[in-house]
Image (spheres, helix red, strand yellow):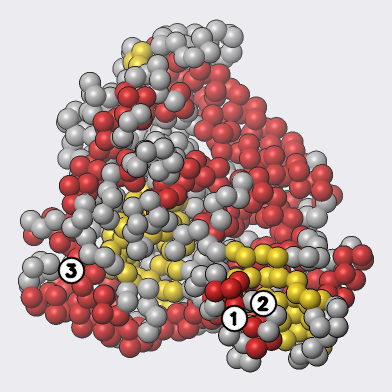
Amino acid sequence: PRYALCWLEYRPCDDRVYREAVINRIRTLWVQPGEDIVGSEIRDALSRLFHHTPQEGSTGGGGALYVGTSDQSPVAERISAAELGKLGDEGFILKEVGERDGSSSLVLTARTRRGLVYGVFSLVSMLQRGISLDGISLHEEPAFPLRIIDHWDNLDGTIERGYAGKSIFFHRNKVVKGLHRIRDYARLLASVGINGVVLNNVNVRNKALRLITEEYLPSVRRIADVFRDYGIRVYLSVNFMSPVYVGGLPSADPFDPSVKKWWAEVVARIYEYVPDFGGFLVKADSEFNPGPHSYGRSQADGANLLAEALAPHGGLLIWRAFVYNIQDWRDRKTDRARAAYDIFSPLDGRFADNVLLQIKNGPMDFQVREPVSPLFGGMERTNQMVEFQITQEYTGQQIDLCYLVPMWKEVLEFDTHARGEGSTVRRVVDGSLFGRPHGGCAGVANVGSDYNWTGHWLAQANLYGYGRLTWNPDLSSEEIAREWCLRTLTRDGEAVDRLVDMLLASWPVYEKYTTPLGLGWMVNPGHHYGPSPEGYEYSFWGTYHRADNHAIGVDRSSRGTGFATQYRSPWRELYDDPATCPEELVLFFHRLPYTYTLKDGRTLIQYYYDSHFEGVEEVKRLREEWLKLRKHISPRVFREVLERFDRQVKNAVEWRDVLNTYFYRKTGIPDEKGRTLY
Ligand code: BDP
């Protein structure tokens, strides 16, 4: 094989009792005619896991598995109409039911094909993990309507912020010829509940501009046909200036009727090729991507232009809120953290019904720790999505281990207080808090053409976890990690415990040796790996810490840039005061002297020294833990992960030495514990 199948790599079950129980439960298999995909998934799993081939068809007796939509007779005979009536569009029921002769069977049903796909993969997951099917009665529905993966793939095959090889979609400005890998990717995504994929980078340049034309639409259709089999819709990123760059019009002004007409025609053509096309994703007025501001129009005017073209076809327009404009590092009045809220919140209520605003989880840019974007609590009449970064741009680039599910969970559970207590981000983006018709999650993909898809084998857990979390955010980070380890790496209980602990430790460890207390940045400009304390200090990105000999940080309180006041109470008050601000964010909100005393009595500077020394030791411990797993992990995975840990240790040492030296030289304050500072 040219690539691993991740958590769908079915290792034969060595538990004889369990194997026999499954074989008895599924002696015969009935699959709704026409549902070949779900049928072959279940057959394939049974055969690989248990060397079992059930008899096909319906015997009417027990020991059967019935798989079909809720209107099919073997299903409708066995499950009450009331129960079936509770099924949503994407949900499924998996249930043990009694047969007339006193025996029992299993029924897997859903209202739609998509629901069946999720149900089958969920059954497969249980079979892989040895979960008993006795008395099973499961009804699952996804928590968020949209569960999308955004690819930052360019048509030349490169991937912006990709750390796992080349694009699996594009090669030398064409869609790849063989679609096998895309099919397996669709299976992997569907198996964790993903229902949408954006194929190309939000920075739409060169040939990617033409994806929406007949030059590429036949190829887009080929990809969409594969994803459709697994219930996944395809979306495209588009450039706001397309009417000019592609259409040859003199303008892309949203108020220009010829521009509207152009987009309407473009969209109509797309739907001829892809009848269930998801819609567009747009990065406008952001980092060299033009937008409506060029014409003196608002973000809402820009979004609505495209939304209007998509609406007749049922398409969605996803508009990114990543808009900021810092002209000069010398300007102390503008604060990038404020920008999105300042620009978008006054436009609340002005966006069309099929527009979603896609908001990065934090106000800056995917740093190791940021507060949650205040926009989530600040727009009640706008559909919202949260954007996470699965690809580890600022969190170790899939060289360093960093399991991100705990971070995403914190974001989803953050209480905005927009409608009193319990107004979590989760409820904003699932649409329920403000009664919005659309909502969901987007995650920037971490996959590429590498054999293991994600560069670091253990980074697969982030892709898996993103899917599982957006299906069911009630799952704990630990449960998700455990599922992934069991399905992917080993069935040995102790080894799994150890692996889960390693994954759970990894984000806090990464934070320790990089930029704790909410400081962020300090990375090498351009590629963003490794330390550079002033790498982003004198440019136009708004990413400053303004360290001098006495203090560090930006005052974002009401006395400073006022960013803290964009939150609702009690956050605005809590963040406003360094004494009540959650300590892990204290340098995000405040400018503090190095001698500032933290809650445990340590000075800020001593905390930074300690954190970096400890971080390195903890990475070394992670590496030691991995060494203990040798006999449970396949040799190739073992070796390649060890190689990553070796690199991570080097990186952590570099962060420690560069940052500690930087602070020592700025402050002249020695380490209390007498460790070497350079
Ligand atoms: C930043 C990345 C940049 C992306 C940008 C975005 O460095 O490559 O284009 O985000 O999200 O984090 O648009």
In front of the other: 608 or 655: 608
Residue marked by disc 3: 305
* Residue occupying image coordinates x 86% and y 83%: 101
Q: Residue 79 — which label?
A: 2
> With respect to residue 616, does 238 lie above or below?
below
- Label 1 C-beta lies within 8 Å of the nearest ligand 1 atom: no
Q: Secondary structure at mark 2?
A: loop
Mark 1: few/some/many CA within 10 Å (<14, 14-19, 20+): many
Query: Is residue 187 in view from this perspective?
Result: no
Q: Residue 5 — which label?
A: none
Sequence-earlier tag: 2 or 3: 2
Q: Secondary structure at mark 3?
A: helix
Q: Is residue 304 left or right of residue 471?
A: left
> With respect to residue 677, does 237 lie above or below?
below
Residue farthest along the right direction in this orientation:
16
Q: Give x and y (percent) for residue 24.
A: 87, 76
Query: Is residue 66 in view from this perspective?
Result: yes
Instruction: Kindly indicate the quadrant of the structure image that contains residue 191.
Output: bottom right
Residue marked by disc 1: 70
Front disc: 1 or 3:
1
**Amino acid residing under circle 3:** Leu
> With respect to residue 384, does 408 lie above or below?
above
**Amino acid residing under circle 2:** Ile
Asked if labels 2 and 1 touch by Cβ distance under 8 angstroms, the answer is: yes
